Image (cartoon, rainbow, N blue to C red):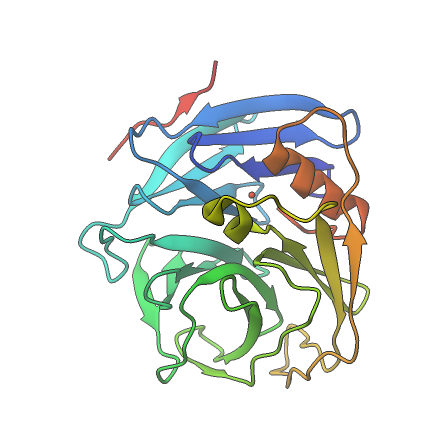
Amino acid sequence: MDDQGLLFVAGGDTGRMFVYDTNTGGLVDRFESGADATFVNDVALTPDGSAFFTDSVNPELYRVFPDGSGGYEAESYLNFEGTPAEYTEDFNLNGIAATPDGRYLIVVNSSSGRLFRIDTGTKEVAGIETGGADLSNGDGLLLEGRTLYVVRNQDEQVVPVELSAGYLSGSAGESFTDDSLMYPTTIAAYDGRLLVVNSQFDASESGTDPELPFTVSGIPISGRASASDTASATAPTSASAVPVPDTGGPPVGVALALAALAVGAGALAAGRRVVRGR
């Protein structure tokens, strides 16, 4: 969510990208990837007002940005063919995070567990060396200073990675988990806690009913990094799971995002033409 209260939501296999006004609950705009095979997965915001969306199936990075007249436009910002992050038939880029100055984007490939840095000025894509750290099933990313928290969904773990000054290498710390985690995906930070959305995607995949209500886990952390420090992440001391309220109308993905905001997530932001949705 930006400082104007606009919430950017990734629409998964709908191929859509949404902009909502959290002050009114209204839909500001909607865009579509335009791809037949698509899974618009995650979003990160940069200081210039741009929202960058990953697609785990179609090898494109999309950008939704202010049009200068109070509205928004969208474009296919970067094609990953021929780059170090070139796509395979597996589930590809998923989580995304932006550096505070917006110069770089950091993304994770769910299948390989590899991290990549994208230069928003040159569109150069470079691999981030992590010394063979296991980040497979990487989903949500949170960058706090130079500490990158990587959520491993199926493994129900969070892995802190201490990144170098140029974000081209990193050292993975000890992973941690909590009994409240249930196929965790998106992650944010608020008031000394990691807020992790419990998707329970494994329930739908196995044909069983999810446990209701859906929850957001709040995991206390200490030793959080500042913009100028490389902090050592420490394991959580205790955690709690907050129920997601029934919002009474928006699609499930939107409801989860709004619910995370409601419990204090704050910063949670879910070669082809990108088109405005009908």
Residue that appears at 70% across and 77% down = 224
Q: Up-down: is 223 above or below 87?
A: below
Q: Is 234 placed left or right of 273 in the picture?
A: right
Q: Is 91 placed left or right of 182 in the picture?
A: left
Residue that appears at 25% across and 53% down = 87
Foreground residue among 156 and 260: 156
Name of the residue lying farthest toward the front: 208
Question: Dividing the picture into quarters, in which one does residue 114 lie?
Answer: bottom left
Name of the residue lying farthest toward the top: 278
Foreground residue among 190 and 71: 190
Question: Dividing the picture into quarters, in which one does residue 19 lie?
Answer: top right
Q: Name the quarter where the N terminus is drawn.
A: top right
Q: Position of residue 170 (x, y in %)?
A: 45, 80
Q: Is 263 placed left or right of 133 in the picture?
A: right
Q: Position of residue 132 (x, y in %)?
A: 35, 82
Residue 71 visible here: no
Q: Up-down: is 26 above or below 213?
A: above
Q: Up-down: is 221 above or below 14?
A: below
Question: Dividing the picture into quarters, in which one does residue 218 lie?
Answer: bottom right
Q: Position of residue 80 (x, y in %)?
A: 26, 50
Residue that appears at 74% across and 42% down = 259
Q: Position of residue 276 (x, y in %)?
A: 45, 20
Residue that appears at 62% across and 29% down = 251
